[in-house]
Image (spheres, rainbow, N blue to C red):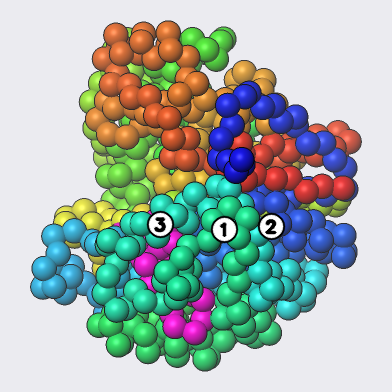
Amino acid sequence: MKTDHLYYPYHSQRMTTVARQGMVATSQPLAAQAGLDMLKKGGNAVDAAIATAAMLTVVEPTSNGIGGDAFALVWIKDKLYGLNASGPAPKSISIEKVKELGYEEMPLYGFLPVTVPGAPGGWAALSKRFGKLPLIEVLQPAIYYAENGFAVTPTVAKLWERAYKKFSTSCTDAMYNGWFDTFAPNGKYPQIGDIWRSPDHAETLRQIARTDAAAFYEGELADKMTEFSAENDGFLTKEDLTAFEPEWVEPISVNYRGYDVWEIPPNGQGLVALSALNILKGFSFHEKEAIDTYHKQMEAMKLAFADGHAYITEEQHMPVTVKELLSDDYAAQRRAMIGDTAEQPEAGEPKTGGTVYLATADSDGNMVSFIQSNYHGFGSGLVVPGTGIALQNRGHNFSLDPEHANKLQGGKKSFHTIIPGFLTKKGQAIGPFGVMGGFMQPQGHTQVVMNMLDFGLNPQTALDAPRWQWVKGKTFHVEADFPKYIAEALIRKGHEIEVKADRSTFGRGQIIWRDPGNGTLYGGTEARADGSIASF
């Protein structure tokens, strides 16, 4: 009888992982091990994060790749730093040019939604500023597995099959041949336990490592990307790549139940999570599994998203400021709108006049919250021939409405879904957390933060708890194990509740919680993925 590695009819319990010297939590076991290897070699949490991130482009290409973007929150030497390694739209693209090609909204596949990939630049920037080991050593595990192959894990295989079927009908032009040659050679996608390798991917990682990513933005790899773009009427040019620089940014925060919750500032949507928590901190929650708890959470999230979708884009293009959106006065205004029944969400006026996630920690107290993505699964469907570089489709988020804050503009960064999170208390690091998965991410952040800070759940249970997800209007999706009696009560309050059996759309998270007293690390990983924690 054939074993089904996606069939789990019995309840399974994972305990919180506890360690002292170091910890790496992510969605794939080999990636977690790569990060741990760096710690054991004398590297720090930053080296571990880079090694894990690079490995994830190999062992989980269904969610991220070399051609994607990245963000990081780095706690090192008692200070929190933010890195925005997302790339802008090509300088020559415009709303007019896209509409001339017959589009009324940004397409999902092809070259139009391709933006400058920021992840390799992000790895190099992190390594240069905070790493202890050479980048060539840090990327070596990823290079090895790309060259020699790895056995595909269950969740990754499921998503790979889903992508293959989608691309087989949606990406039939010759420019997509590179994806099929790389990820489905001879017309076959890998299944659970099959060995997949990509020598081109390995060589690209090797060039990135040897040149601190210069080859990717200025050298041979840049030439291959721009030649591929030109051959297929893309807007991406060598000038776009050479002009790219990752940005060091000041993280933003709100205080919630005595803890500071930190996010990357816009163009990321971390602001949505902070806005929701800022509204919710004015309520008292005494029980997690209560109708009123879920009702208020859902209403606050709708209000936060209404503002996010209206205002978030690259920060200098926002019509309102982050400070205004996160002010206590504005939070009070939005909180007052939450009544006893579900309301249609609308943006307020605050002015007063997909992804992979990983968390690392080392014995010195350094910690990293890191996230990277190609956006929709494999991204644009395009793989640069001879490189293994799957290009992201982040530009799909741009609006073609010339009046919208997030309108398409050459050289501009789009509203970005991927967000790393971090907790501190009274100036001490508590640790990194994150939940990946498109617009589920700020919703996942809000839910796991409340699970820990309002209801005292440990990191593993905070992730295991059934999740809900706002979709549009008054519609929410809930997981199959979401309490039925609460779902029914929410329906009576006017919420439109839909139960979903597929857990993959509810995000996949990781948490590391550090005891500031003795330095002990407590880790939680995701049951909705091939989650793993490596520690010592």
Q: Nearer the viewer, mark 3 or mark 1?
A: 3
Is residue 378 located in the magenta-colored stretch of the structure?
Answer: yes
**Callout 3: SS:** helix
Residue 455 pos. (x, y %): 62, 18
Q: Residue furthest front?
A: 1
- Residue count near mark 1 (Cα–Cα under 10 Å), binned few <14, some 14–19, many ≥20: many
Q: Are marks 3 and 2 in contact (CB under 8 Å)?
A: no
Residue at 39% across, 29% down: 500
Q: Main secondary structure of the magenta part?
A: loop
Residue 178 vs 247, above or below: the answer is: below
Residue 333 pos. (x, y %): 34, 24
**Callout 2: SS:** helix
Residue 529 vs 474, above or below: the answer is: below
- Magenta residues, as a range? 376-396
Q: Are marks 3 and 1 in contact (CB under 8 Å)?
A: no
- From the image, tell me which residue sits under label 2: 31
Q: Name the side, left or right, on which 373 lies relative to 149.
A: left
Q: Quick one: 121 or 163, which is closer to the camera?
A: 163
Sequence-earlier tag: 3 or 1: 1
Sequence-earlier tag: 3 or 2: 2
Q: Are marks 1 and 2 in contact (CB under 8 Å)?
A: yes
Q: Which mark is residue 163?
A: 3
* Residue 496 visible (yes or no): yes
